[in-house]
Image (cartoon, rainbow, N blue to C red):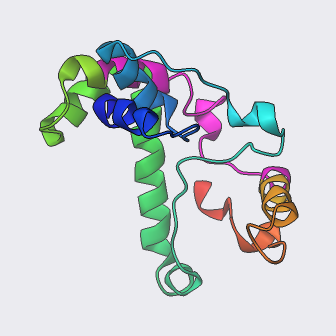
């Protein structure tokens, strides 16, 4: 990652969007100094949800039980990672043959503080965040029309 970024910078790259909890940690461990600016400082509407779980309306109608079970298991996993970042890094390491345990632990220690403001309410979304983000995208021509927030998310399966 850092080598690629150094190479990109040499080719005249001025800006790049990266993920603090992964790229930022790796750059720090490799001694690569980054000059960063959070997107929200450019425009307050650049507040967004990450990660986002996606399924189809068809799946929701045909198999809501599986959707609910998946969301429940995912929420439990995130809540565990929030409460136990070092242990969750060890679990992740069993599946990640590329990254070091040192890196994964540092990443999880950082991310555990950023997964959510309220672990018990993990996954809950608001129309305001979705409308702000799509409003920004429409204003700058990234999408042709605003998408109603009610068409993009549901909190139904968090209950």
Residue at x-position 69% and y-position 47%: 48
Residue 41: horizontal and vertical position, in percent? 78, 30
Residue at x-position 28% and y-position 25%: 104
Q: Nearer the viewer, residue 150 or 27?
A: 27
Based on the picture, tell me whether residue 63 belongs to the magenta stretch. no
Residue at x-position 39% and y-position 17%: 32
Residue 119: horizontal and vertical position, in percent? 58, 32
> Residue 120's image quarter?
top right
Left or right: where does residue 122 sit relative to residue 13?
Answer: right
Number of dots carrying numbers: 0
Q: Is residue 55 above or below residue 34?
A: below
Left or right: where does residue 107 sit relative to residue 40?
Answer: left
Residue 82 visible (yes or no): no
Instruction: Tell me which segment is drawn in magenta.
Output: 105-129
> Where does the N terminus fall, quadrant-wise?
top left
Q: Is residue 131 above or below residue 121?
A: below
Q: Nearer the viewer, residue 141 or 45?
A: 141
């Amino acid at each position: 990652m850092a080598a690629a970024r150094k190479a990109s910078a040499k080719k005249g790259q001025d800006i790049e969007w990266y993920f603090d909890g992964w790229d930022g940690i790796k750059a720090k461990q490799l001694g690569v100094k980054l000059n960063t600016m959070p997107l929200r400082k450019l425009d307050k509407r650049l507040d967004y949800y990450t990660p986002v779980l996606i399924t189809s309306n068809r799946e929701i109608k045909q198999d809501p039980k599986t959707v609910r079970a998946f969301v429940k298991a995912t929420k439990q996993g995130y809540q565990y990672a929030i409460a136990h970042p070092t242990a969750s890094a060890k679990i992740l390491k069993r599946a990640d043959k590329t990254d070091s345990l040192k890196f994964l632990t540092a990443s999880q220690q950082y991310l555990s503080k950023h997964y959510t403001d309220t672990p018990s309410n993990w996954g809950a979304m608001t129309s305001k965040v979705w409308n702000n983000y799509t409003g920004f995208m429409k204003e700058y021509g990234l999408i042709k029309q605003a998408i109603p927030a009610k068409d993009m998310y549901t909190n139904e399966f968090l209950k």
